[in-house]
């Protein structure tokens, strides 16, 4: 592990073990105050988390960091509030409409994974690994045994999966692919509605037919992708699918509304907002108190000075925006995303210089006009 990676990990203070699993802990970023989850994974999952970090999804926890430490991978990811689907099902069965809504959203989560090049298959879809947020959102939280599909392989190297939800091919019959996740979706849908596996009892009617096709032993006879499965459900429950669409749009609108708030206000945390207000006020006050003088030492006054001060204040707000990745602005600047701490610092110094120069030039142009 490099020194910069050790520094990144040192920013996360361990709080508690999560779900009695010593390899999964709740941590807090001592710089931002953000709560996250720290996991120790097999090093073979590095490519999976590299994909998840660069392909954000509303249906999957955001990956903040992934760091190699010998033969293990340390992952820091978003902490998801809510309850897992298994806990909900311990209290009650779900209605058909609720079950269809959840499967629809899981399909949306899987689509970018299945259509990646090469494709990624989850392999461990089950109620315990599906979180339902207080707002009704759905997220897949576990990619411990996800794998990249390798064309030409006859079967998986290691048989993995949860009995009852895992497709037959996950136990050595052939290589798993996106259709293995479709098998799990059919089983989960049946389990949500009846609290039984399909081998015990299958939902009646046309929905039962959809489930039966999902869980066929031969993957070639199942739905070939999540789009086909979505379409089949939409034909049976168009009104439900419309509700899902509206709920998803509302959730995305709410998320987008929060995204436009300045850093420090997006989480709604009162202490973060207080710190942000103090910080913003300090920046504004610093530049408003700044004096400009001529070469002979005479104090410069007038509206042009105020414009120059405002431009400098805005330049610092832009720097803060990049520092806290406002609206994803930092994502497309490789230097600011480097795992090397020194390179990141250099990147921010260069950005600061550029912003000051631009603000100064604009100030000069305004005063000349």
Image: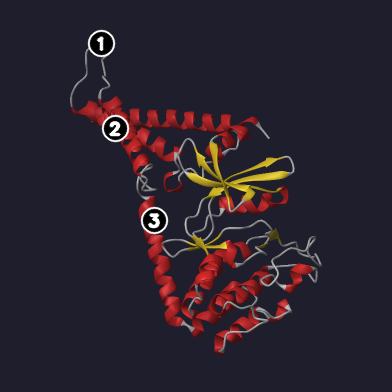
Q: Residue furthest bottom?
A: 205
Instruction: Write down the quadrant of residue 282 in the picture.
Output: top left
Question: Visible in this render: residue 228?
Answer: no
Q: Which percent across, then down, holds residue 285?
A: 27, 27
User: Does dot 2 land on a helix, a strand or a loop?
Assistant: helix
Q: Which percent across, then down, holds residue 108?
A: 53, 67
Instruction: Write down the quadrant of residue 126 in the picture.
Output: bottom right
Label of residue 297 in the image: 1
Residue at the image position 66 percent from the left and 69 percent from the top: 178
**What is the spatial separation of the Cα atoms under label 1 and label 2, in whole angstroms?**
29 Å
- Please identify the quadrant where the N terminus is shown: top right
Which one is in front in this view, the residue at disc 1 or the one at disc 3?
A: 3
**For this view, does 87 lie left or right of residue 150?**
left
Residue at the image position 52 percent from the left and 46 percent from the top: 36
Looking at the rendered structure, the number of numbered marks drawn on it comes to 3
Q: Nearer the viewer, residue 11 or 86?
A: 86
User: Does dot 1 land on a helix, a strand or a loop?
Assistant: loop
Residue 74's place in the image compared with 358, above or below, is: below
Circle 2 crowding by C-alpha within 10 Å: few under 14, some 14–19, many from 20: few
Residue at the image position 19 percent from the left and 21 percent from the top: 301
Determine whether label 3 and label 2 are within 8 Å by CB.
no
Q: Nearer the viewer, residue 181 or 336?
A: 181
Residue under label 3: 256
User: Does dot 3 land on a helix, a strand or a loop?
Assistant: helix
Question: Visible in this render: residue 163?
Answer: yes
Q: Which percent across, then down, holds residue 248?
A: 43, 67
Determine whether label 1 and label 3 are within 8 Å by CB.
no
Residue under label 2: 281
Q: Which percent across, then down, holds residue 332?
A: 51, 45
Residue at the image position 41 percent from the left and 61 percent from the top: 252
């Amino acid at each position: 592990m490099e020194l910069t990676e050790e520094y990144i990990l040192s920013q996360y203070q361990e709080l508690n073990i999560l779900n009695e699993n010593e390899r999964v802990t709740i941590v807090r970023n001592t710089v931002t105050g953000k709560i996250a989850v720290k996991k120790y994974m097999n090093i073979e999952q590095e490519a999976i988390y590299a994909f998840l970090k660069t392909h954000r999804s509303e249906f999957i926890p955001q990956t903040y960091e992934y760091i190699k430490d010998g033969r293990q991978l340390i992952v820091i990811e978003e902490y998801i509030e809510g309850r897992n689907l298994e806990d909900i099902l311990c209290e009650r069965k779900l209605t058909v409409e609720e079950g269809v809504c959840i499967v629809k959203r899981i399909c949306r989560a899987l689509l970018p994974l299945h259509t990646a090049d090469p494709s990624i298959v989850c392999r461990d879809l089950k109620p315990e690994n599906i979180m339902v947020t207080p707002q009704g959102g759905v997220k897949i939280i576990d990619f411990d045994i996800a794998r990249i599909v390798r064309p030409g392989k006859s079967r998986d190297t290691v048989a993995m999966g949860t009995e009852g939800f895992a497709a037959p091919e996950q136990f050595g019959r052939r290589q798993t692919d996106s259709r293995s996740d479709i098998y799990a979706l059919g089983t989960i849908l049946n389990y949500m509605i009846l609290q039984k596996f399909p081998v015990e009892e299958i939902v009646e009617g046309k929905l039962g037919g959809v489930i039966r096709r999902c869980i066929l032993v031969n993957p070639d006879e199942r739905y070939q992708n999540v789009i086909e499965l979505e379409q089949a459900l939409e034909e049976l429950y168009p009104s439900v699918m419309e509700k899902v669409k509206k709920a998803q749009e509302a959730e995305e609108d709410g998320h987008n509304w929060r995204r436009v708030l300045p850093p420090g206000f997006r989480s709604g945390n009162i202490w973060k907002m207080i710190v942000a207000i103090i910080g913003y006020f300090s920046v504004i006050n610093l530049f408003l108190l700044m004096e400009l003088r001529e070469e002979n030492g005479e104090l410069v006054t007038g509206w042009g000075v105020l414009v120059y001060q405002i431009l400098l204040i805005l330049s610092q707000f832009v720097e803060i925006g990049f520092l806290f990745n406002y609206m994803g602005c930092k994502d497309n600047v490789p230097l600011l995303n480097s795992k090397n701490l020194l390179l990141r610092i250099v990147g921010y110094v260069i950005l600061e210089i550029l912003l000051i120069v631009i603000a100064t030039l604009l100030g000069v142009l305004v005063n000349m006009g």
